[in-house]
Amino acid sequence: MSRTLLKVSLFIVLIFFSWKFYAQTKGIKISDLKPFIQLFEAEEQKEIEPITTIKKEVDPKENLRIEEIFACTINLTSAAGTDSQTICEEQNIVNITYEVLGSGSVSVIGLPTGVTYSMSGNTLTISGAPGSGTAGSYPFEVNASGGSCAGTTTETGTITVTPETEITSQPVGETVCQNGSVTDLSVAATGTGTISYEWFVNSSNSYSGATSVGTGATHTPDISNDGTFYYFATATSATCGSVNSDIVQLTVTPETEITSQPVGETVCQNGSVTDLSVAATGTGTISYEW
């Protein structure tokens, strides 16, 4: 309450009681003092104005600098789980993408050979195919720093590279006689999981148009017919696909065969006789012994 208002209130109270005393001595009714009572009540109920808060405005001329520091954000935008994937050697990974905000520079470390990253606007893309011989686990880091970043923000992931299916022992061709003996063809391969094998034969030196003739790591070729035959095997793993072996040539030469038999006869002692003769076919020079 201000000093002026306090003085006025005290003055009104003084007048009120003075009039009351005067009224009692002169026989004046209290109701006649109603205007003074109302004035007193009005002054008592008068709202006191609050103290005004003084705000100091910053003068732009003072050139005050307000600096706000933001944390960088790195958000995975490719499908969930793409930042932790398993891939075979020499096969393209599923692209991994991130939205990177607020950074001045972005780097990725720990990627396998053959896998790279690139930035386009706020989008970071990791893509490519791990090279041959890169099998292993590759924990990688995406780091964002500079710009409006406070320090370095990091997101992590893992690319696991499994070995490609690879032939480690090739089959060997040979030349054999028809219906003779033959060495089994064999093959060996490495890869991820269980390796299965299938054998093929062809009449030409080609993988195309071949006929399946058996399964397993070894195969006994058919040599009941003469001719030149081309064999190869396919090694397959459930995870990293299949690979063909070398094509090998198996030559089956015709077996030696009598084509003209000698003919017997009856002759006189010391008489004339027809020579016995024989003819045969086979591979190379045929020799005869009687």
Image (cartoon, grey):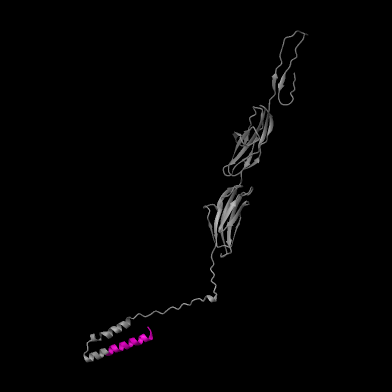
Place of residue 230 in the rendered image (x, y in percent of width and height, measured from the top left): 65, 34
Q: Quadrant of residue 250?
A: top right
Q: Looking at the image, which residue sits at the far right?
A: 270
Horizontal side of residue 289 vs 142, given as left or right: right
Q: Looking at the image, which residue sits at the far front?
A: 61
| First to last magenta residue range | 1-18
Q: Is residue 18 above or below residue 113?
A: below
Q: Quadrant of residue 173?
A: top right
Residue 212 magenta: no
Residue 184 in sight in this render: no
Of 172 and 90, which appears nearest the observer? 90
Place of residue 180 in the rendered image (x, y in percent of width and height, measured from the top left): 67, 27
Q: Quadrant of the N terminus?
A: bottom left
Q: Quadrant of residue 145?
A: bottom right
Q: Looking at the image, which residue sits at the far top?
A: 268
Q: Residue at x 63, y 35 (%)?
A: 218
Q: Quadrant of the C terminus?
A: top right
**Most common secondary structure along the magenta stretch:** helix
Of 284 and 49, which appears nearest the observer? 49
Of 176 and 46, which appears nearest the observer? 46
Q: Residue at x 65, y 32 (%)?
A: 229
Place of residue 279 in the rendered image (x, y in percent of width and height, measured from the top left): 72, 19
Residue 6 magenta: yes
Q: Is residue 46 above or below residue 110?
A: below
Q: Residue at x 23, y 86 (%)?
A: 32
